[in-house]
Amino acid sequence: MADITVESSAGGAVRSLREQVRGRVITAADEGYDQARVVHNGMFDKRPLAVLQAEQAGDVIAAVNLAGEHGLDLSVRGGGHGAPGYGTNDGGLVIDMSPMRTVRVDPRTKTARADAGATWGDFNYATHAFGLATTGGIISTTGIAGLTLGGGIGYLARGCGLTIDNLVSADVVTADGKFLTASERENQDLFWGLRGGGGNFGVVTSFEYRLHEVGQVFAGPIFYNLEDAPTVLRMFDEFIRDAPEQFGGFPGFQIAPPLPFIPENRHGDTLCLAVVHWAGPIDQAERVLKPFRDVAPIVADGSGPLPYPALNGAFDALYPKGLRTYWKGAFVKDLSDAAIAAHVEHGSTVPEVTCTMHLYPINGACHRVGANDTAFAYRDATYGMVFLAGWTDPAKDTERIQWLRDYYHAMSPYSEPGGYINFMQDDDHGRIRDNYRQNYDRLVQVKRAYDPGNLFRMNQNIAP
Ligand SMILES: Cc1cc2nc3c(=O)[nH]c(=O)nc-3n(C[C@H](O)[C@H](O)[C@H](O)COP(=O)(O)OP(=O)(O)OC[C@H]3O[C@@H](n4cnc5c(N)ncnc54)[C@H](O)[C@@H]3O)c2cc1C
């Protein structure tokens, strides 16, 4: 009897949604359900009641109202890259923003208005046509939405700030179904929370960004022998303290993929990696990047001039949709010798080509924004450190997760308690307060003002 009640209420909800929206509403009975329900991380095999492929803000308003009325779990999905798989759920509603991906550039004001379903590939191609860009992710298939709302770390961060530092305004559907604009002039508390507070406050339907002149860049990966990793990491840490801000690369560990610029006899070897990225004048690249040429013998050098969007798509193939992944992150202030030794011990054990650790520098322009000016609290960190394990065989789940946890725990004495929320996993809820430090209490206040019933709870949740 109870089942029938649930069934008919759910069926009624889906019918009602279909009557109100322009986008497709896909249930288990519809063709395409299996594609519509999955996210990038292959670890999450969930079966929502319905996926709404939103086509306009009105669709989002209808879905938010309906989820509230029926008490449904609500997932909001941009690019679907979120490691904890909150972009799908069991038995609830999913708002998939991916049909909404128009990017409109205004070269006069050097701004762009992008619909929230756009990826960084969509965004970069649109802005590159005008010789412009803003800080975004290093992979082109990542959504602008989730990445922006968490903070936004990328190659351009040292020169242009985090993605949120370039956010001018956002259109948002809040839990009560209202459509608001948040900016420095309107709904300032919401605007503050959106810049780092993740998907806690509403569904963003479009973002407006400030753009910078970026066209051709000099960038790519440089590989070194593992035995030189301590020297390379030490050099990087010293270099990045006062490197020109148009430099934005990162060091890490990487099994050499079978790429043409890597000698064939080194394919499959575990190497130390430095991805370099210079967005300043191309004729200055060699001078700026000299420390990377001089630090140790180079095994393979894939750096060179290329358009910024080409760089953004260069590593996409390493992280295909469906790859099983597990992540951890932490902020780092100083890379001590002991930290470097621990990195070398664990980094040299990366088990496959899709497992890695990267240290993304977030000094320069990121440090010129106050720790309370946006929800993103760690303005004094030098690096956003990410640990990523990716694999395809479900039989390896335990082994790969353990590898990553061992590496992450070994680095804990040398890193901050908090990390970047976009590098957190679904078992990281205990770290929310640490991630936001002094900003946590204010985030709770904003949550209470805009989502007191916690409709938006499928995220790194700030409980009201
Ligand atoms: C291959 C790969 C590379 C990455 N590289 C980088 C990088 O270079 N820099 C970086 O900073 N991060 C990077 N990340 C992490 C990335 O920032 C997060 O995974 C981010 O959540 C992805 O956003 P998304 O829209 O693709 O994901 P989704 O899973 O769609 O969204 C993540 C969460 O954001 C919220 N959300 C999404 N859309 C909306 C919306 N319209 N309104 C309100 N809330 C919304 C929801 O809570 C959702 O669960 C990378 C991730 C991957 C998988």
Image (spheres, rainbow, N blue to C red):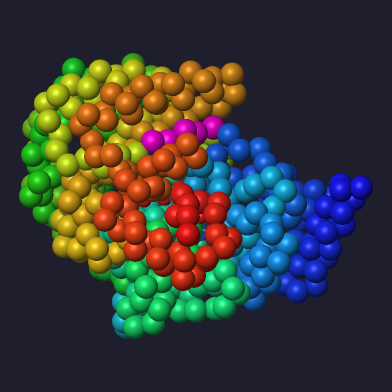
Q: How many numbered tags mark residues here?
A: 0
Q: Quadrant of residue 366?
A: bottom left
**Does the image show residue 198?**
yes
Query: Which portion, as a residue range, is magenta?
Result: 324-328
Q: Is residue 459 left or right of residue 189?
A: right
- Residue 164 versus residue 437: which sits nearer the camera? 437
Q: Which residue is drawn at the image coordinates 92% and 47% (left, top)? A: 1
Residue ID at (32%, 26%) = 409
Magenta span includes 116:
no
- The residue closer to the viewer here, 76 or 124, is 76
- Where's residue 353, x and y in %? 42, 26
- How far across and down, in percent of the image, does residue 242 sit? 7, 50
* Along the line of sight, the residue nearer the viewer: 448 or 15: 448
Question: What residue is drawn where x is 65% and y is 47%?
Answer: 89
Q: For residue 47, what is the image quadrant?
A: top right
Q: Main secondary structure of the magenta part?
A: strand
- Give x and y (percent) for residue 264: 36, 20
In this picture, residue 159 sits left or right of residue 180: left
On screen, residue 272 above or below 129: above
Image: 107 above or below 124: below
Q: Residue at x 63, y 60 (%)?
A: 95
Image height check: is 287 above or below 108? above
Q: Considering depth in this image, is 19 or 298 the residue closer to the camera? A: 19
Asked if residue 103 can be seen in this view, the reply is no
Q: Residue 462 in the image: x percent, y percent?
A: 45, 55
